[in-house]
Image: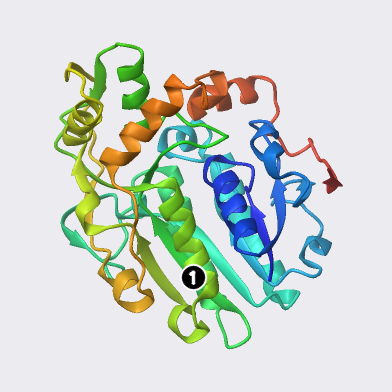
């Protein structure tokens, strides 16, 4: 099966592409490479890379494609708020365009990379049937995308949405702006762990290899099980309070837990049920946050991951906006690398 992965050079995408290759899939990556292309250097001889943008890439990108994993996005809530209009252009309009092109070109499967952030704030345990309550441009774009793309599903075009938990773990395109990773970096540097007030807000978390495996599981699943369906991707035992994530990062690495509060109270909080993906697809996570924290710390010790200006998405996007590098007139015309 030939799979097109949009955003395949990103934090999750670069890990997922290697896993796809290892399981026998043929992979094409479509990416603007705002963060550079180095994350794919170790597999560049095994994949086809097209440097272009979901907003205007020619429809010929779909030639010979059997399935699409659509991950291209302005990632995370803070980065999405930098320029909400651009977030909607890329995360909603651009990816909706990819879905429509895929259907027109008779691509068999399309998997949306959505987010549990669409739940916003909920006191009760949320399921795939819970009405979304998106609170940010990023989560609103995801909710709109789901609402307009899922109805494209029919017997010839299998559409599935995966609402991912907050991801942790090492990647060749590292991110240190997500909770467990950021806290592990602080611990490695001997600094106080920063905890966003008031620490009781809950998030579901998932290892980067586990979330990648969720997409691969959907690709391999019987179409009748996944067509037109939404699945929360994660594990019930990894719904954690932000404060507890900070504690486990320190304790898992045998370090003193020393923290400081920052920011205004975070009103995004939700506990997610992952029963559906387990019961329908037999999907289970293989990694724990404790293992992830130790893995991240060892990767930092061994220099396998580094913290630079590109590893904090918000700061790097600010720089790109200053350089006018996320504007519509920068068109790369499907350059194949």
In the depicted structure, whether residue 104 falls above or below residue 310:
below
Q: Position of residue 248 (x, y in %)?
A: 20, 33
The quarter of the picture where residue 36 lies is top right
- Between 22 and 190, the one nearer to me in the picture: 22
Q: Position of residue 238 (x, y in %)?
A: 24, 50
Residue under label 1, please give it: 218
Q: Position of residue 194 (x, y in %)?
A: 26, 21
Total tally of numbered discs in the picture: 1
- In what quadrant of the picture does the C terminus appear? top right
Q: Is residue 110 visible?
A: yes
Q: Residue at x 77, y 66 (%)?
A: 62
In the depicted structure, whether residue 260 falls above or below residue 265:
above
- Between 304 and 192, the one nearer to me in the picture: 304
Q: Residue at x 25, y 14 (%)?
A: 192
Question: In the visual, does 222 lie left or right of 63?
Answer: left
Q: Position of residue 131 (x, y in %)?
A: 29, 65
Question: In the visual, does 152 lie left or right of 234?
Answer: right
Q: Residue at x 80, y 63 (%)?
A: 59
Q: Is residue 178 visible?
A: no
Question: In the visual, does 290 lie left or right of 98?
Answer: left
């Amino acid at each position: 099966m030939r799979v097109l992965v949009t955003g395949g050079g990103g934090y999750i995408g670069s890990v997922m592409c290697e896993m796809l290759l290892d399981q026998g899939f043929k992979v094409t990556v479509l990416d603007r490479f705002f963060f550079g292309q180095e994350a794919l250097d170790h597999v560049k001889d095994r994949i086809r890379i097209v440097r272009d943008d979901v907003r205007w890439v020619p429809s010929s990108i779909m030639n010979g494609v059997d399935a699409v994993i659509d991950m291209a996005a302005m990632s995370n809530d803070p980065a999405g708020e930098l320029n909400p209009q651009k977030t909607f252009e890329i995360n909603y309009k651009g990816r909706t365009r990819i879905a429509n092109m895929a259907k027109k070109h008779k691509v068999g499967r399309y998997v949306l990379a959505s987010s549990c952030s669409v739940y916003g704030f909920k006191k009760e345990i949320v399921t795939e049937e819970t009405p979304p309550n998106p609170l940010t441009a990023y989560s609103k774009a995801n909710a709109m995308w789901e609402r307009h793309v899922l109805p494209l599903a029919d017997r010839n075009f299998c559409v599935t949405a995966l609402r991912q938990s907050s991801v942790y773990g090492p990647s060749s395109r590292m991110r240190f702006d997500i909770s467990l990773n950021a806290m592990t970096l602080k611990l490695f540097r001997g600094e106080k762990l920063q905890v966003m007030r008031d620490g009781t807000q809950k998030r579901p978390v998932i290892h980067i290899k586990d979330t990648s495996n969720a997409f691969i599981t959907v690709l391999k699943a019987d179409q009748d099980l996944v067509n037109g369906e939404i699945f929360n991707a994660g594990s019930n035992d990894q719904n954690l309070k932000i404060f507890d994530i900070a504690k486990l990062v320190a304790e898992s690495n045998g370090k003193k837990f020393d923290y400081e509060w920052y920011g205004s109270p975070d009103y995004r909080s939700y506990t997610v049920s992952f029963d559906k993906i387990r019961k329908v697809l037999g999907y289970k996570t293989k990694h724990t946050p404790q293992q992830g924290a130790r893995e991240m710390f060892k990767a930092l010790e061994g220099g396998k991951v580094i913290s630079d200006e590109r590893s904090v998405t918000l700061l790097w996007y600010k720089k790109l906006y200053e350089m006018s590098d996320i504007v519509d007139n920068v068109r790369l015309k499907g350059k194949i690398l």
